[in-house]
Amino acid sequence: MQPSPLQARRVRALFGALLTSLVALAALLTGASASHADTTICETYGSTTIKGRYVVQNNRWGTSATQCITVTDSGFRIAQADGSVPTNGAPKSYPSVYNGCHYTNCSPGTNLPARLNSISGAPTSISYSYVGGAVYDAAYDIWLDPTPRTDGVNRTEIMIWFNRVGSVQPVGSPVGSATVAGRQWQVWSGNNGGNDVLSFVAPSAIDSWSFDVMDFARNAVSRGLAQNDWYLTSIQAGFEPWQNGAGLAVNSFSSTVNLGGGTPGGPGGPAACKVTYGTSVWQGGFTADVTVANTGSSPVNGWNLTFTLPSGQQITSAWNAGVSPSSGTVTATNAAHNANIAPGGQAAFGFQGSYSGSFVRPNVFSLNGTPCSTA
């Protein structure tokens, strides 16, 4: 029997209402599922894992006021950040995400701790979101120690300040500037009473960046704050708030540590190197012709030569390499045409400078963190 037109309309109306209800229920369930994917942590040292390979930690240690973080599937944001501490002292917390080990809490499947001279590369990327109304720094931490320890405080902390807001500053005092991983930084060095701290401060805020952690580790080695047989134990990214901080977020974080087949020079880094430093000197001025020889068995693919100019010397121009800063501990970075040095090969660059007092040559050179002999 065929339904009447009135019955058909009632069936269609009933079906439409049922369909609308099902769509609304599906939306509700989807929303609940998405909400459930985020985890809120308010415990002082509470933590969880994301992506099956990183640890996110609340890490509130400088205040008893409440701090909560909301952990997403790719990072975290600070949901509540009560209280404040004086800006001339330590921050109140370091909510962060990391690869490696922090006070015996190791991230799943990590390669850390690992000797620096066993790491061929440590590529990483980070994306931050910043807010107003807070005093903080956005800090990327790299921890080094003579032993493969997974607990307590390591010997050397490298901090990369992507951003800072308010009257806060790194531990220690400024020691010059440097070009590391292709960017210019103001460099600070000091000790906080428990470990050495080497900080690289960006001249303006960096929202996101991809780089190799080993570029900064090699710089620490060249400054005598670590050794090639030390261990990289942890790679961390987060915020150090002094006042407020709600809304600050790490949108995404990735960190990989590649082992084997390399040295502190990175992929194809040198096992050995020799530097020839020839000069032409006149009253108040000089030129230096520098030759870098790869005496190892592996090719060098990209290089940084670090050395310290004696007091009173200053670089005024350079060729076949970028050299910065102009005085103190400087780093010469290859040009495009001489980036690769084959085993038994060499690269050359030069610079002109001024000096006061007696002229003295530098006598200690490091190529990609590896000490070189001199001719």
Image: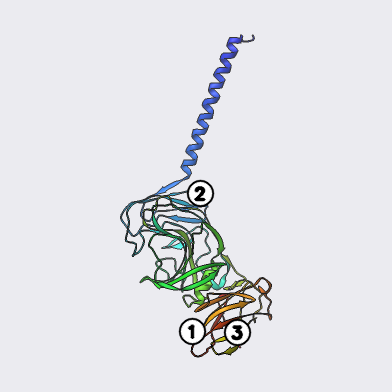
Image quarter of residue 335: bottom right
Is the residue marked by circle 3 packed among few (<14), some (14-19), or many (20+) residues within 10 Å? some
Task: Return the mark for residue 288.
Answer: 3
**As drawn, 263 above or below 102:** below
Query: What is the spatial separation of the Cα atoms under label 1 and label 3, in whole angstroms?
Result: 15 Å
Q: Earlier in the sequence, mark 1 or mark 2?
A: 2
Graded by Cα atoms within 10 Å as few (under 14), some (14 to 19) or many (20 or more), the crowding at tag 2 reads some
Vertical arrangement, residue 249 with respect to residue 149, above or below:
above
The residue wearing badge 1 is 312
- Give the secondary structure at mark 1: loop
| Location of residue 99 in the rendering, given as x and y in whole percent from the top left corner | 50, 60
Is residue 256 at all visible to an observer of this figure?
A: no
Check disc 1: other Cα within 10 Å, few if <14, some if 14-19, many if 20+. Answer: some
Which residue is nearer to you in this view: 35 or 224?
224
Tag 2: residue type? Asp
Q: How is the model colour-coded?
A: rainbow
Q: Is residue 116 above or below residue 357?
A: above
Q: Residue furthest left?
A: 64
Query: In terms of secondary structure, where does tag 3 sit?
Result: strand
Hey, what amino acid is under mark 3?
A: Ala
Give the quarter of the figure containing the C terminus: bottom right
Q: Quadrant of residue 266?
A: bottom right
Q: Quadrant of the N terminus?
A: top right
Position of 280 with respect to 103 (left or right) is right
